[in-house]
Image: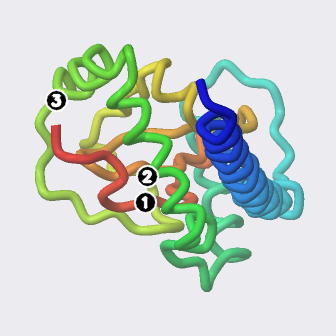
Amino acid sequence: MTRWKHLSLTVFAFLLVGHSVAQSKDDAATVKDFQERVTKYLDVHKETHIDKKPTDSPHKLADQKQQAAEKIRQTRGAAKQGDIFTPQIATYFKKQIATALQGADGAKVRASLRHAEPLPNIQLMVNEKYPPNLPLQSTPPTLLLALPRLPKELQYRIVGQTLVLYDVTSNLIADFLPDAVPPL
């Protein structure tokens, strides 16, 4: 290999690594922004805390969940789609999902998503209850590995092509990202 060719390859490799590092710093900043927004959402939980007394009664548990949902709705009265999934965060999530679908386990992830029940035309709303007639489809583990971890109060759910940030404790939609999952 000539000296110039070797030097050219070294410079090219350096530029690729430099671009990768810059991209990962951008990604890290985006993930940090997402985590901060999730933390702000969870702060609402602390502000709206209701006294939950241990009970085996399904009616009391449902009532506690309803009370929590009402307090969160009141506190987040102006909440709208995109408060957590900002445009930059949305771009990151869509990239991560696309990468997972194209990866080594992509066929398994797509098959898992295809096996979900067909969904009617659903209108999702931030700060509203997760639609009662809609199954809580689990998100494939391989896809979850590509996304930032969530605290136990929140879960990712997929509704058609939409990624939903689901509040388990109040049964509310914290935010959602339309067209997050490309057509299968």
Q: Is residue 11 left or right of residue 40?
A: left
Marks 2 and 1, the one that precedes in the sequence:
2
Q: Are marks 2 and 1 in contact (CB under 8 Å)?
A: yes
Of 87 and 167, nearer the camera is 87
Q: Which mark is residue 117?
A: 3
* Disc 3 secondary structure class: loop
Q: Quadrant of residue 47?
A: bottom right
Tag 2: amino acid: Lys
Which is more foreground, mark 3 or mark 2? Answer: 2
Q: Which residue is mark 2?
A: 94
Q: Position of residue 45 (x, y in %)?
A: 79, 55
Q: CA distance from mark 2 to mark 1?
A: 9 Å
How busy is the neighbourhood of tag 2: few (under 14 within 10 Å), some, or many (20 plus)?
Answer: some
Q: Residue at x 21, y 58 (%)?
A: 122
How busy is the neighbourhood of tag 3: few (under 14 within 10 Å), some, or many (20 plus)?
Answer: few
Give the answer, above or below, for where 106 lies relative to 3.
above
Q: Position of residue 183 (x, y in %)?
A: 17, 45
Q: Which residue is mark 1?
A: 177
Q: Is residue 125 left or right of residue 69?
A: left
